[in-house]
Image: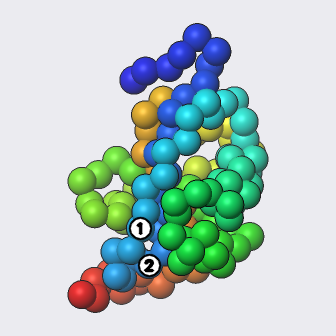
Amino acid sequence: MRQDMAGEAVVTVRLVRSFEHRNFKPVVFHGISLDQTVQDFIQFVRDDITTRPGLPPPFRKYAYGMSDMIHISETNELVMSLDDDEKLILQDGQTLRTAGVASETEVAFFRKEDYGLYKANPKSAW
């Protein structure tokens, strides 16, 4: 894991628009402070994606809500693992560092409601 001297990290965020259709877009963020809270990082991602050049409108305009979640992607699954939620879903009040995020970590960003529906019936539609 690489981290520069200023304590900033590179974090890849998988913007998950649909679990069922495996519709996600990875976005790389540079210079992320691992000492910010999970809530601050979620707000930063929300704010960034609405104006990010090159990001397709369906991802920029997707209705991420107040119950957005961040999940550390520790799997080769196309979108993310459905196991170990207690360990992998970042909790409010934690810093990214405390939650286990380090430089070059991949995380998924998604709506809690979408995840709950998919987890209850994890079938893909092609």
Q: Residue at x 71, y 50 (%)?
A: 44
Instruction: Give the residue at mark 1.
Output: 24
Question: Which amino acid type corresponds to the residue marked 2 in the rendered image?
Answer: Ser
Say if mark 1 contacts mark 2, CB within 8 Å: yes
| Residue 126 visible, this orientation | yes
Check disc 1: other Cα within 10 Å, few if <14, some if 14-19, many if 20+.
some
Image position, residue 25 (x, y; %) = 43, 63
Distance from Cα at disc 1 to Cα at disc 2? 7 Å
Instruction: Give the residue at mark 2.
Output: 18
**On-image quarter of the C terminus:** bottom left
| Residue 101 visible, this orientation | no
Q: Nearer the viewer, residue 29 or 92?
A: 29
**Relative to 72, residue 110 above or below:** below
Q: Residue at x 60, y 69 (%)?
A: 60
Indicate the quadrant where residue 48 lies. Answer: bottom right
Q: Which mark is residue 44?
A: none
Q: Residue furthest top?
A: 5
Q: Nearer the viewer, residue 38 or 2?
A: 2
